[in-house]
Image: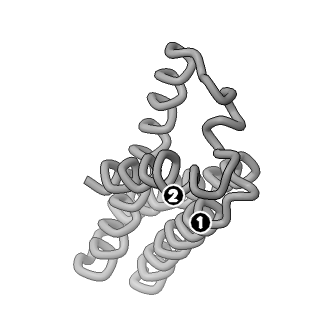
């Protein structure tokens, strides 16, 4: 669900909000009259990115809830810590998207905010697990 919300927000930005300022991000990448197949592929890639953003949020939120709610034995704690580290790393990796949207402040804020939030929530989950230790 979070991925769908991110995708709808992105499409609204790309095709409603962004065109009001003149040159659009989509036109900058594919030209003023983009060919159908590259445009379809770009929209598919954007869906995948939004899906992964939504998945990252879900994983981070569930991780902090899990860490605050349950006590685990040492073996299970090791496994969930590994998952949290992967979620944190994947969230941080998405910072590479910022240069692609540079110059489009709402997208820069959204991507950077997403990265900070997922990394922060995942780190908080890891901290809770360490403290419960």
Task: State whether residue 98 is above or below residue 40.
Answer: below
* Res. 17 mark: 2
Residue 120 picture quarter = bottom right
* Res. 12 mark: none
**At 56% across and 51% down in the image, what residue appears?**
90
Secondary structure beneath disc 2?
helix
Q: Of 5 and 32, which appears nearest the observer?
A: 32
**At 48% across and 79% down in the image, what residue appears?**
124
Q: Which residue is mark 1?
A: 106
Left or right placement of residue 47 versus residue 66 in this view: right
- Contact between marks 2 and 1 (CB within 8 A): the answer is yes
Colouring method of the image = one colour
Secondary structure beneath disc 1?
helix
Give the class, few, some or many, for how many residues have Cα within 10 Å of label 1's Cα (few <14, many ≥20): some
Q: Of 44 and 85, which appears nearest the observer?
A: 44
**At 47% across and 22% down in the image, what residue appears?**
40
Q: Which residue is outermost to the bottom? A: 131
Q: Earlier in the sequence, mark 2 or mark 1?
A: 2
Give the class, few, some or many, for how many residues have Cα within 10 Å of label 2's Cα (few <14, many ≥20): few
**At 66% across and 49% down in the image, what residue appears?**
97
Residue 62 picture quarter = bottom left
User: Could you say where residue 49 lies in the image, as x and y percent from the top left?
Assistant: 49, 42
Residue 6 picture quarter = bottom left
Q: Of 22 and 41, which appears nearest the observer?
A: 22
Tag nearer the camera, 2 or 1: 2
User: Could you say where residue 29 lies in the image, as x and y percent from the top left?
Assistant: 69, 33
């Amino acid at each position: 669900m979070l991925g769908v919300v991110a995708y709808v927000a992105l499409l609204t930005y790309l095709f409603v909000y962004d065109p009001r300022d003149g040159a659009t991000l989509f036109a900058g990448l594919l030209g003023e009259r983009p060919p159908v197949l590259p445009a379809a592929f770009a929209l598919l890639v954007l869906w995948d990115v939004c899906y992964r953003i939504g998945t990252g949020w879900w994983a981070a939120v569930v991780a902090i809830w899990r860490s605050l709610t349950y006590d685990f034995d040492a073996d299970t704690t090791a496994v969930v810590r590994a998952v949290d580290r992967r979620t944190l790393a994947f969230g941080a990796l998405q910072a590479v998207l910022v240069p692609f949207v540079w110059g489009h402040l709402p997208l820069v804020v959204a991507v950077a905010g997403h990265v900070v939030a997922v990394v922060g929530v995942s780190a908080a989950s890891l901290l809770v697990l360490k403290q419960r230790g």
